[in-house]
Image: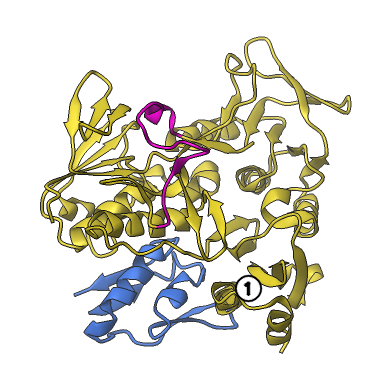
Chain colours: A blue, B yellow
């Protein structure tokens, strides 16, 4: 599983961080950082939740 | 699971997320989705912003699933089709034209409809904003360079429309009957902050006044206010709230009381769940029966309702911390939890003057909400205070470090 963020769409709403803090972090500079681009399978549920909750549909999951 | 045929009424965000979860949980039977609009589910937040201004095309609002194409869900689409009734005992949805749609499981996600100003239905140039077609109609009118727009109602829709107008360089009056914008949603203190934000961007903010009359021969020409002021306008956008779409369910046997009344698990009747703007349910985390009109709730409640429908009587309670955002000018306003006019409000980080801050809302000694302006990470960080029902004094101490 590979996490891809479209930074042209991302507005740092930080919903992804609430859903999957292991993978997504919005820092004090208000930018989103992907902590793991290829998270382990056990995080799939959380990452899918992050993708669903993103107000900009900026997160996609490949594989 | 015993549910061969599931029907979702409402081709909406909540309806789509319910469909997605039903398939994810292994529902292999038929899945029919009924929508009264001709469109597949689309995203509404851009309708008061990028679609209205023309910055994004309407096609960009089409919703997809989290992991792929909407076509993967194998849905039986009934678009441009209005549901007119429900026979609970027969487990049948009635459609306009007389068709009867039998179901084993039913998801109600019919959303809400904007309230209109009485007596304005026959006047051209008076709009409400809810649907894609509404947004395109208002957008076209804005690009015809109106002299002045009147926005009636300074809730989130009205405030965002006013901001979009200013972004296009259009003169706009924002008219609100209450003393500040967003008073019901954010309380008087933070409502005042929003009023100043709009004034600083050149909006003619008129508070504590109502509309007496909208006048015009063929189309709108003037708005007459309760304080005697008459505004010359050629476009009016009305944002005075919505009512849940429950008319078609009257007499069905479901309890209709400002929405479809559900139990704590989103169940409205055996085999029937409801989600999104149309649903009202007891949120035990807040000890409050609520109906939440937020985008985020459509997702999480649609998902939860789907789980309840397939749970076989062993459903979990739906106890979310509601969350919403509103983009106005270059400010992002976010609230996690609840906030009302009577709550205590304390700024715990940043400064209101800088329009970059975090504030907590407290009710009966407990923190109930976290508001941020241009502080998305902080709002998410402190949302756990609301989730955990932390005491007001402890919450203030923690957040102030």
The quadrant of the image that shows the N terminus of chain B is: bottom left
Identify which residue is drawn at 40% across, 60% down. Answer: B300
Q: Nearer the viewer, residue B138 or B42?
A: B42
Name the residue furthest right.
B228
| Residue A59 placement: quadrant | bottom left
Residue B166 position, x and y percent, is 68, 46
Identify which residue is drawn at 47% across, 45% down. Answer: B277
Q: Is residue B75 left or right of residue B121?
A: left
Is residue B25 visible in this depiction of the protein? yes
| Residue B108 placement: quadrant | top left
Residue B394 position, x and y percent, is 70, 83
Is residue B82 visible in this depiction of the protein? no
- From what the image shows, is residue B282 above or below residue B245? below
Residue B243 position, x and y percent, is 53, 35
The quadrant of the image that shows the C terminus of chain B is: bottom right
Name the residue furthest bottom.
B401
Identify which residue is drawn at 59% across, 81% down. Answer: A29
Subunit of label 1: B
Q: Nearer the viewer, residue A13 or B317?
A: B317
Q: Give the mark count.
A: 1
Residue range of the region highlighted in magenta in the rendering: B245-264
Q: Residues within 10 Å of mark 1 (few under 14, many from 20)?
A: many
Q: Secondary structure at mark 1?
A: loop
Query: Which residue is labeled 1 in the image?
Result: B375
The rendered magenta stretch, by its main secondary structure, is classed as loop
Residue B42 position, x and y percent, is 37, 46
């Amino acid at each position: 599983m590979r996490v891809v963020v479209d930074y042209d769409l991302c507005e740092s709403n930080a919903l992804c961080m609430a859903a999957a803090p292991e993978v997504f972090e919005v820092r004090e500079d208000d930018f989103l950082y992907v902590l793991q681009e290829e998270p382990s399978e056990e995080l799939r549920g959380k990452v899918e939740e992050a993708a669903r909750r993103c107000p900009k549909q900026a997160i996609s999951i490949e594989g | 699971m015993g549910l061969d045929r599931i029907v979702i009424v409402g081709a909406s965000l909540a309806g789509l997320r319910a469909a997605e979860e039903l398939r994810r949980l292994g529902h292999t039977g038929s899945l029919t989705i009924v929508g009264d609009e001709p469109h597949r589910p689309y995203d509404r937040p851009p309708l008061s912003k990028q679609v209205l201004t023309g910055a994004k095309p309407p096609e960009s609002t089409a919703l997809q699933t989290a992991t792929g194409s909407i076509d993967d869900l194998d849905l039986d689409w009934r678009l441009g089709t209005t549901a007119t009734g429900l026979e609970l005992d027969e487990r049948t949805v009635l459609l306009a034209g007389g068709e009867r749609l039998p179901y084993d499981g039913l998801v109600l996600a019919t959303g809400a409809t904007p309230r209109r100003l009485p007596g304005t239905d026959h006047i051209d140039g008076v709009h409400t904003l809810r649907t894609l077609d509404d947004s395109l109609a208002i957008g076209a009118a804005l690009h015809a360079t109106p002299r002045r727009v009147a926005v009636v109602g300074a809730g989130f829709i009205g405030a965002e429309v006013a901001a979009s107008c200013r972004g296009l360089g259009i003169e706009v009056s924002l008219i609100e009957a209450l003393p500040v914008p967003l008073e019901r949603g954010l309380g008087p203190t933070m409502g005042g902050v929003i009023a100043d934000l709009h004034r600083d961007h050149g909006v003619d903010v008129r508070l504590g006044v109502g509309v007496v009359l909208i006048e015009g021969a063929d189309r709108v020409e003037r708005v007459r206010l309760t304080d005697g002021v008459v505004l010359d306008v050629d476009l009016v956008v009305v944002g005075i709230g919505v009512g849940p779409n429950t008319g078609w369910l009257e007499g069905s046997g479901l309890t209709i009381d400002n929405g479809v009344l559900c139990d704590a698990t989103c169940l409205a009747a055996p085999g029937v769940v409801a989600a999104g703007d149309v649903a009202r349910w007891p949120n035990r985390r807040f000890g409050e029966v609520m109906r939440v009109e937020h985008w985020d709730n459509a997702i999480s409640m649609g998902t939860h309702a789907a789980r309840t429908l397939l749970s076989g009587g062993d459903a979990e309670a739906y106890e979310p911390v509601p969350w919403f955002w509103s983009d106005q000018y270059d400010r992002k306003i976010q609230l996690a939890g609840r906030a009302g006019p009577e709550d205590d409000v304390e700024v715990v980080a940043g400064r209101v003057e800088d329009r970059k801050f975090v504030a907590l809302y407290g009710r009966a000694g407990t923190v109930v909400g976290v508001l941020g302006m241009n502080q998305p990470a902080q709002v998410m960080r402190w949302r756990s205070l609301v989730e955990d029902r932390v005491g007001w004094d402890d919450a203030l101490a923690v957040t102030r470090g």
